[in-house]
Amino acid sequence: MRRHLVAAALVAPLLLAACQQKPSIPTPGPGASAPASPSSAVAVPSGSATVTTTSKDVAGFQLSAHRRQEQYTSPDRTSVASDATPPGFAAPPPGQGRQRYLDQTIRWSACDGFECGTVLVPLDWDRPDGQAITLKMKRRVADQKRTGTLFINPGGPGASGQQMLETFDWNSFPQRDVVGWDPRGTGESTPVVCGTPEQTEAYLASESSPDDAQEFQAAVAQNKHFAAQCRQGSGALLDHISTIDTARDLDYLRFLVGDDTLDYLGISYGTYIGAMYAELYPQRTGRMVLDSAVNITTDDSVIQAMGFDLALRNYATWCAEQKCELGSTADEVIASVTGIFDSLDQEPLEVEDRELTQGLGVTGAVTYLYTGSSGYTQLTQALVSARNGNGEPLLATADIMNGRQSDGSYDSMTYGFPGVGCVDAEDPGIDGSVKEFEQDKKKAPVLAPYFGVSLTCPVWSAKPSPQLELRARGAAPILVLGATGDPATPYEQAVSMAEQLEPGVLLTWKGAGHSAWDLGNACVKSAVRDFVNDGTVPPDKKVC
């Protein structure tokens, strides 16, 4: 499983909301054969189902019980010493061993129409008497008689589950408390901390696709500086924010809310959290929906940039049909788009006291593709503005993706994304990444050259976590959603996830954009509601 080049998170609501708030801008990631596909007659246990388990099993993990799928050796990872204590580091709760956490309760309090909760978890679940960190969460209480809890996560890695809850369609699940939490390393939970806003600004604006050896070495140095800033600001936290750690936290939260099985809806990277949970705790997996799947296999024949190439081609076809200013054919539109990117490499656009560089321009443009066709008009206007010398729209959209705030600071996803992503995945080192980049350019010839060589993880200061083969053997049916025009998590990844997870059931939405649940049609919505509310499993490979 390779690191994602662009954040795989649910950004459509953020982008649309932000555009509406900016009137000065044009409107714009062991081999028994898989069982037969579950039929729609199967009733999947819900959160209140009775499962044989004891409290000592909560958040447990035995590496020897799982098959591994190592692929690389990560030879160039760096070593940086730091005893930093980021916000949320705390003394463990009273008691001894794991029992001190099992005796804990979530402290809920009213906040802006929801309930906000705080709980401590061990930095290292295998050393419960050591350092503790903080998890923050938000709950929307069930409208009807409660039957359980639905946990939700928007992806990233690094996106906020609490923020997701604020725009989530909880009315579709009236008998569920809906809980969004910020995973360790992110949001209001104990976050990854990296340098100053000025240092982050320089890092994000730096050359993303070096043109010569000098620029390449400068890029390597810039990534090493960034990695050191994150270790110096985050300390030991960087070694304990893998998805394995987060899945153990999630099992603990399930225990604290009183559910015997986990009901869960995860989008994008959130599908990796769900798949990991189902691998670690198959008997405690309830009604699980994994939307816009990341690649959980070692097959890299389909890469993220291919999804963006497809999405850009779909946009270009629409633009030409609308007789837009960028061209009369799809090829002409794509040539106009890449021409804008190339001009930014030679001459960045000044935007007040900042610059729209090529890297920021590419980020801004592809961000519009997350929303599918609803973002096409805005994308056209932003691109035309850039061609005419106004980089503000693309820079503003890049800021949304990069988590840049109006005061110049950055939200935690900017740092949680590489922090979690790099500890989750192995890498082939700097030289190996260069070789992969050459292959990537053949697979996605339009956008992969602009995404550049993946250098963040090869020089990261935390070692990769164990690479588990995710099969979820023995778990209840898991509903996997995929959109045929998804830019950030190509549809093929949903197919492969549903195939590799032994209880996987594939539901396809023939549409464009990132998240079938959020952007999909009534067919998708109905299938998900029936699955979560009633346990009704749709036919495998159903198409909406």
Image (tube, grey):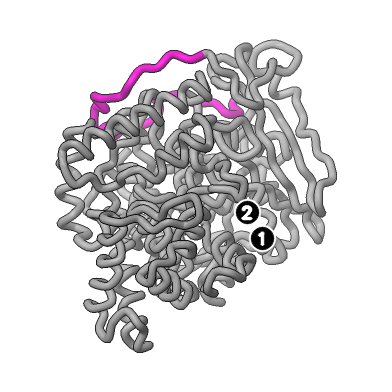
Residue 216 inside the magenta-drawn segment: no
Q: Which residue is mark 2?
A: 164
Quadrant position of residue 24: bottom right
Q: Which residue is mark 1?
A: 167
Q: Which residues are magenta?
A: 57-82
Tell me the residue at 79%/51% (across/down): 114
Residue 32 visible in the snapshot: no
Question: Above or below — where is 456 with respect to 12?
Answer: above
Quadrant in the picture for the C terminus: bottom left
Quadrant position of residue 72: top left
Q: Where is residue 433 shown, x and y percent of the image?
A: 21, 38
Nearest the viewer among 523 and 499 is 523
Tell me the residue at 45%/26% (across/down): 229
- Secondary structure at numbered mark 1: helix
Mark 2 Cα shell of 10 Å, populated few (<14), some (14-19), many (≥20): many
Q: Where is residue 518 shown, x and y percent of the image?
A: 55, 65
Q: Where is residue 172 shown, x and y percent of the image?
A: 68, 66
Nearest the viewer among 311 and 104 is 311
Question: Above or below — where is 67 with respect to 331?
Answer: above
Farthest residue to the right: give it.
Answer: 110
Question: Above or below — where is 3 with respect to 543?
Answer: above
All told, the count of numbered labels is: 2
